[in-house]
Image: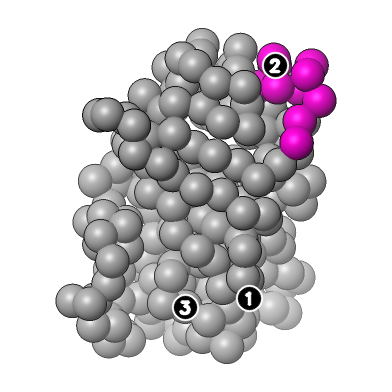
Amino acid sequence: MKDLPDLTAANEDVKRLVANAMGRTFYSYREDLFSFLGFEDPLCRVNKLEDASMIGSRCADGVHAPVLDIDFPAELRPCVDKQILALGIQMAPEESYELMRVVKRLGISGWGDGAHMELNCPAILIPSETPGHFHLFLETKLSLPNYEDLLAALFRAGVIEEGFFDCFLRNMTSTAVLPWIRRREELPLSYSECDDGLPIRNFDYFG
């Protein structure tokens, strides 16, 4: 087991992520034990944050709390009792319309143009290790079909990358590296840190 980093000086967004109010799943990355089986990036579920390298959208109750990888500038702006999500991307009118149609249907936003939307749920935006990129966590729960609809609309609008969406389609969950993990320098862990002993197949996208 690893020691959990000292998070007393962490910002409020990291503390909210660690609190894990949505009940998202934590994973460790397993390179040694399962590499001979052909798993490109084997992950296994862990119960303790100290053992985790990544956090996934799948929750303990089987639904999904969105975990998104944003490969361009993004910002959460306060607006009365809500937040405005501002994405540094230009969308075609038809893509913007379709994205807003989906997020309105799912109750995520009731106003916006796709690149800017007023959120009806709390959100956490944390810079990733890559400068100018972010991990976005929407604090709401969606069924698997609804989450797939959301990701499909985000992909068509250019908000998430093809590799991220394809990885979700293979594994039926999306993930992001935890803020204090430095990618593959720290991702491989020992077998004793894997609580279920089984990896997720073909998990080859580390947003």
- Element assignment for label 3: loop
Q: Which mark is residue 189?
A: none
Q: Which residues are magenta?
A: 90-99
The amino acid type, in three-letter code, at marker 1 is Phe
The amino acid type, in three-letter code, at marker 2 is Glu
The amino acid type, in three-letter code, at marker 3 is Ile
User: How packed is label 1: few (under 14 Cα within 10 Å), some, or many (20 or more)?
Assistant: some
Q: Residue drawn at (41%, 77%), measured in percent from left and top?
A: 180
Whichever of labels 1 and 2 marks the residue nearer the N terminus, that label is 1
Q: Residue drawn at (69%, 15%), measured in percent from left and top?
A: 97
Q: Determine the CA span between mark 1 and mark 2.
A: 41 Å
Question: Where's residue 49, x and y in %?
Answer: 30, 69
User: For mark 2, what is the residue?
Assistant: 98
User: For mark 3, what is the residue?
Assistant: 181
- Element assignment for label 1: loop
Q: Which mark is residue 34?
A: 1
- Element assignment for label 2: helix
Q: Residue drawn at (49%, 37%), measured in percent from left and top?
A: 85
